[in-house]
Image (cartoon, rainbow, N blue to C red):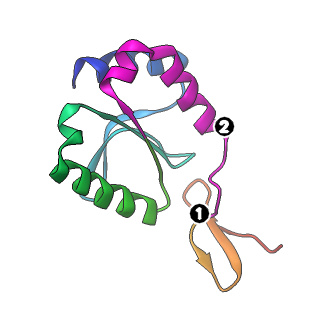
Amino acid sequence: MTFPERILWDELRRLKLNIRRQAPIGRYIADFVHHDSRLIVEIDGPLHEELEAVAYDAERTAWLESQGFRVIRFSTKQVTDGLSDVVDAIRSALLSPPSQPFPHQGGRALWRARDQWVRDEN
């Protein structure tokens, strides 16, 4: 774990938000994940700015989103320079539901709520 990941993890653990670190999801490892809200938090270092890394991250994010996760990213600089702002953004994302339920099927929404599919009859 990098230094920015470690300081963020220490802060998230103190808040007791039930976030897991280095969690396997499919063939990927998420830096941090909150399974109940389907939120993944990624901390990106300078290598993520390189062209190949940008393409890989886009593919990875697309796959994670296809599995019903939301992905938010912060740079290591954002974490080290503004830890409280990053934590506030994560807390806000945890409180706001996804904008569209997953997956959409036959005009009725289905979403996963605590390991069971729920049908929206509206």
Residue 59 lies in quadrant = bottom left
Q: Amino acid at mark 2?
A: Leu
Assign the C terminus to one quadrant of the image.
Answer: bottom right
Q: How many callouts does the rendering have? A: 2
Residue type, label 1? Gln
Q: Relative to 49, is 12 on the left or the right?
A: right
Q: Which residues are drawn in magenta? A: 73-101
Q: At 38% across and 62% down in the image, what residue appears? A: 62
The local crowd at label 2, few if under 14, some if 14 to 19, many if 20 or more residues have their Cα within 10 Å, is few
Between circles 1 and 2, the one closer to the viewer is 2
Disc 2 marks which residue?
Answer: 95
Residue nearer the viewer, 118 or 29:
29
Q: Residue 87: within the magenta?
A: yes
User: Looking at the image, which is closer to me, 9 or 75?
Assistant: 75
Q: Nearer the viewer, residue 102 or 118?
A: 102
- Which residue lies most toward the bottom here? 106
**Residue 27 picture location, percent across and down:** 24, 58
Query: What separation in Å lies between label 1 and label 2 (alpha carbons)?
Result: 20 Å
* Residue 121 percent coordinates (x, y): 80, 74
Could you tell me which residue is drawn at 53 percent across and 31 percent down? 90
Q: Quadrant of residue 33?
A: top left
- Would residue 30 be counted in the magenta stretch? no
* Foreground of the two, 45 or 40: 45
Mark 1 burial class by Cα count in 10 Å: few <14, some 14-19, many 20+: few
Looking at the image, residue 56 lies above or below residue 35: below
21 above or below 23? above
Question: Which structural element holds mark 2?
Answer: helix
In the image, is residue 2 above or below residue 27?
above
Residue position for label 1? 116
Q: Secondary structure at mark 1?
A: loop
- Identify the residue shown where x is 64% and y is 62%: 100
